[in-house]
Image: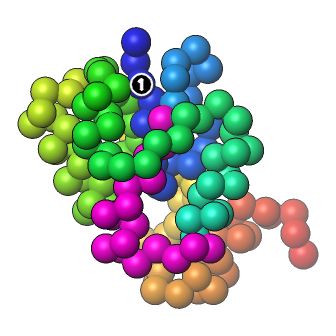
Amino acid sequence: MTIQWMHFDALNADWLDPAAPVAYIFDDAHLNSAGWGLKRILFVYETLLELSRVDLYRGSTVEILAALGSPVISVDSPDPWLRQQFEVLRSRGVELQILPAPVFVELPPRTDLRRFARYWKKAEPLLFPDRP
């Protein structure tokens, strides 16, 4: 049976198959090295609870997914740590299918993304054209 791996860059249910199990892994080593705070962890946890059908795990991402079996399906991410996990899983013989990440909004080329306010100033009119 296919395992659907939901990670922090794929916290929506749009891509999920309702018939297949969903796994989210709180990887302590990654959370600590990336400097995740309790508020961010809580936000992810509460988001997952809203979905209600996600099995939560705590431990090494690679070890847990390898133990759950393959194939594993997930969503692409630009995050270097996640890309490394994809490669390690493949090197361990896990059949991994990576779906393209959904596009939230199409922004003009060279949009300044260094600050959220600058991003939102460009994105909001495209997402909500009827707002004054």
Q: What residue is drawn where x is 64% and y is 46%?
A: 48
The location of residue 22, given as percent across then percent down, is 52, 30
Over which residues does the magenta segment extend? 23-39
Question: Considering only vertical position in the picture, is 82 above or below 112?
Answer: above
**Is-magenta flag for residue 129?**
no
Q: Is residue 11 left or right of residue 23?
A: right
- Is residue 111 at least partly visible in the picture? no
Left or right position of 12 against 128: left
Q: Is residue 39 left or right of residue 81?
A: right
- What colour scheme does the image use? rainbow
Q: Which residue is mark 1?
A: 3
Label total for image: 1
Taking depth in this image into account, of 48 and 125 the one nearest to the observer is 48
Decide if residue 93 is in sight here: yes
Coordinates of residue 90 in the picture (x, y in percent) = 16, 34
Compare residues 19 and 131 and report the one nearer the observer: 19
Q: Is residue 4 left or right of residue 12?
A: left
Q: Position of residue 6 (x, y in %)?
A: 48, 41
Quick check: is 27 in the magenta stretch?
yes
In which image quadrant can residue 130 be found? Answer: bottom right
Residue at image point 65% right, 63% down: 43
Q: Residue extending furthest left?
A: 91
Q: Residues within 10 Å of mark 1 (few under 14, many from 20)?
A: some
Secondary-structure class at tag 1:
strand
